[in-house]
Image (tube, rainbow, N blue to C red):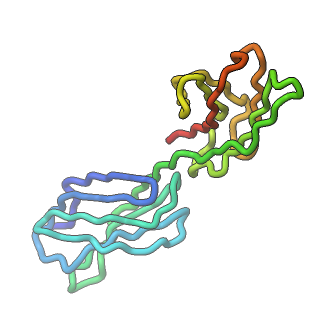
């Protein structure tokens, strides 16, 4: 009888992936490793924990939003190790990080330029970015008023707020935002 995976569950995160499953093989197995590659370049081997015919392995130190290839190497102890077919998975991205660099008021303080920067895209393309504001909450969210920068992407951007959206003689709370697929 040959080695076969009868069950394989893959849980993928931003910097790790865990595989749990069950295999069938009538003989004795001395060990199983998962061989990992990124774009064909070797990224190491991970020892698989065996308990009866159940197995599990966690691969750590991975990069966000990256496709990896993997296969199992099965050591029977008496002959050349057996390699399974190659499969792929892609790690998830992280949320981008963004901050407000500066708030510039016009001379008459009726309009403001909010200068922001997407500092890290989280490993995935930033699809939208902008600001949200509130006159009620000191930590506005996307559920409050928003204005998006139409360019998207990483780096610096600015949003102008004028009298058409601002309430005069009122304190406004402003936060920058950025979105990617995460």
Query: Vertical placement of 129 versus 66: above or below?
Result: above
Q: Residue furthest front?
A: 169
Q: State left or right for residue 155 relative to residue 133.
A: right
Horizontal and vertical percent position of residue 39 = 55, 62
Q: Residue furthest bottom?
A: 78
Residue at 57%, 51% in the rendered image: 123
Residue at 40%, 66% in the rendered image: 60
Query: Vertical placement of 49 versus 100: above or below?
Result: below
Q: State left or right for residue 97 relative to residue 161.
A: left
Image quarter hosting the N terminus: bottom left
Horizontal and vertical percent position of residue 10 = 31, 53
Q: State left or right for residue 120 relative to residue 103.
A: left
Horizontal and vertical percent position of residue 62 = 47, 63
Q: Quadrant of residue 59?
A: bottom left
Q: Residue furthest right?
A: 107
Q: Quick one: 104 or 119, which is closer to the camera? A: 104
Horizontal and vertical percent position of residue 138 = 55, 32
Q: Quick one: 179 or 139, which is closer to the camera? A: 139
Residue at 76%, 35% in the rendered image: 158
């Amino acid at each position: 009888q040959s080695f076969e995976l009868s069950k394989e569950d893959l849980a993928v995160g931003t910097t790790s992936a865990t595989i749990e499953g069950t295999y069938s093989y009538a003989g004795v197995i001395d060990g199983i490793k998962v061989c990992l590659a990124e774009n064909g370049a070797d990224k190491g081997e991970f020892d698989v924990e065996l308990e009866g015919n159940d197995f599990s392995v966690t691969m750590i130190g991975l990069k966000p939003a990256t496709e990896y290839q993997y296969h199992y190497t099965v050591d029977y102890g008496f002959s050349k190790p057996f390699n399974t077919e190659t499969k792929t998975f892609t790690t998830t991205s992280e949320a981008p990080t963004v901050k407000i660099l500066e708030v510039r008021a016009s001379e008459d303080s009726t309009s403001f330029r909010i200068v922001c920067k997407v500092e890290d895209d989280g490993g995935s393309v930033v699809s939208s970015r902008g600001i949200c504001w509130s006159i009620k909450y000191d930590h506005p969210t996307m559920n409050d008023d928003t204005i998006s920068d139409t360019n998207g992407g990483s780096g610096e951007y600015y949003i102008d707020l004028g009298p058409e959206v601002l309430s005069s003689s009122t304190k406004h709370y402003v936060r920058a935002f950025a979105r990617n697929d995460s």
